[in-house]
Image (cartoon, rainbow, N blue to C red):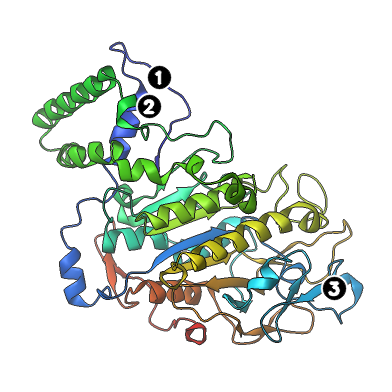
Amino acid sequence: MFKFDAEKAVEFCDGMKRRDFLHAGSLAFLGLTMNDLFKLKASGAINKDKDVNCIMLFLVGGPSQLDTWDMKPDAPLEIRGPHRPINTNADGIQISEIFPRMAKHADKYSLVRSCYHTAAAVHDTGHQMMQTGRLFQGGIEYPHIGCVLGKLKGPKGDVPPHVLLPRPIGNTGGNMPHGQTAGFLGKIHDPFVLNADPSDPKFEVPDMLPPDYLSSMRVERRRNLRQLVDGAVKQLESSGDAKLLDSTFSQAYTLMSSAEAREAFELKKESETVRDKYGRNRFGQSCLLARRLVERGVRFVTVNMFETVFNEITWDIHGSKPFSPISCYKDLVGPMFDNAYSSLLEDLHQRGMLENTLVVALGEFGRTPKINPAGGRDHWPQCWTILFAGGGVKGGRVVGSSDEIGGYPKDRPTAPGAIAATIYKALGIALAHEIQSSQARPIRLIDHDIEPVNELF
């Protein structure tokens, strides 16, 4: 992945820092040279008349369906849990009391209550499938949906096509890829990673400052770097990477100094009222930043609600340390999501952007129907709920249902591939399209027998 910032700044003997080099180098690999875009449109792989963006809210940890969006108030206490259902502004739809603001916007989103998968009940496999549509097998890492969109449609203006906020998913116990890279598409199509906390009062994006702040010394360093790269390419003509860096350096420099790109990250331009409404926390400010990015041309934004499930309050409510108690849903996690998600839908709707912006909120699995001895719920990929809004999705609907204890799909079972297919459909990307893999063979985006959740549209 390409990061706006590196964790350590190593200074070379000429005064240029390693971070400066990484900033320039990473920007060169944003997929800015998309020579086959018109061929793809002509082939029907992408719908040239459909320009829908996407914000994917990844709810790391796996929200409990029974405590959020698929309440079972008539089930025994050890099943239904401590939270009570409330009515929404959509007829017949109830959600948990931990989401009072969401209840007022149910006409804008729809619920798929019958998601499931049959792979191992570990976080990493769920991360892979929900963001790529496939489980990684045989050494093949499939690309994140946002990376596929970036490859097929390219960037708009000087902003990258796919941005990941605030940081990539870290350790969740499986030591496997999380599905947040371009996989076999190659690093040129990796998401642009902020790698910073936008809720930090000192938050700023390196190299996104106004031109007046770019000293002549820093400009000169970049010119020197260009000369260095030019020399390296001449000496290493057989190196594809060097040629790529040289051929795209000017575009990378343009992005680094672009007023459009810089302005997209200027959260301080939002009013204090708006920032408070989203929540002064990492997830809330990341959602606000996602709206700003899409508003200014970024096609796909992935927001990770959490980075890990260890020693941090998350959706992963096993009930004992290093995990979270079930009470955190009402005390912290629920309000955090409620404020950010509701504010995002409100803003997109009021700005006339919701119809052309798909907002998907999803986790990697659900939680066990029965509360465990520690007072929490464990991993349960057999059934859970995800949310769709905008991008042509009809609001106020429930697709599929679970059984009386929220343990298994009762009707319309929906696997991760179907969720990915639904996102691709909203984005105007043909499911039958094949993309070239590093194994020198084309791979179909979605398997032949998988259909999107058409009931949402």
Spatial separation of the CA atoms under disc 2 and disc 1: 7 Å
| Residue 446 against residue 130 in the figure, above or below | below
Dot 1, crowdedness within 10 Å: few (<14), some or many (≥20)?
A: some
Q: Residue tagged by mark 1?
A: 10
Q: Residue tagged by mark 3?
A: 79
Dot 2, crowdedness within 10 Å: few (<14), some or many (≥20)?
A: some
In the depicted view, which residue is nearer to us: 185 or 176? Answer: 185
Q: Residue tagged by mark 2?
A: 19
Query: CB under 8 Å between callouts 2 and 1?
Result: yes
Residue type beneath disc 2: Arg
Q: Earlier in the sequence, mark 3 or mark 2?
A: 2
| Residue 163 against residue 202 in the figure, above or below | below
Spatial separation of the CA atoms under disc 3 and disc 2: 51 Å
Q: Position of residue 39 (x, y in %)?
A: 15, 69
- Displayed quadrant of residue 119: bottom right
Q: Is residue 113 visible?
A: yes
In the depicted view, which residue is nearer to us: 152 or 186? Answer: 152
Spatial separation of the CA atoms under disc 1 and disc 3: 54 Å
Q: Is residue 283 visible?
A: no
**Which type of secondary structure does the marked residue at label 1 adopt?**
loop
**Residue at 19% across / 52% down in the picture?**
33
Asked if residue 386 lies left or right of residue 295, the reply is right
| Residue 120 against residue 189 in the figure, above or below | below
In the depicted view, which residue is nearer to us: 356 or 326? Answer: 356
Please name which of the two marks, 3 or 2, marks the residue nearer to the observer: 2
Dot 3, crowdedness within 10 Å: few (<14), some or many (≥20)?
A: many
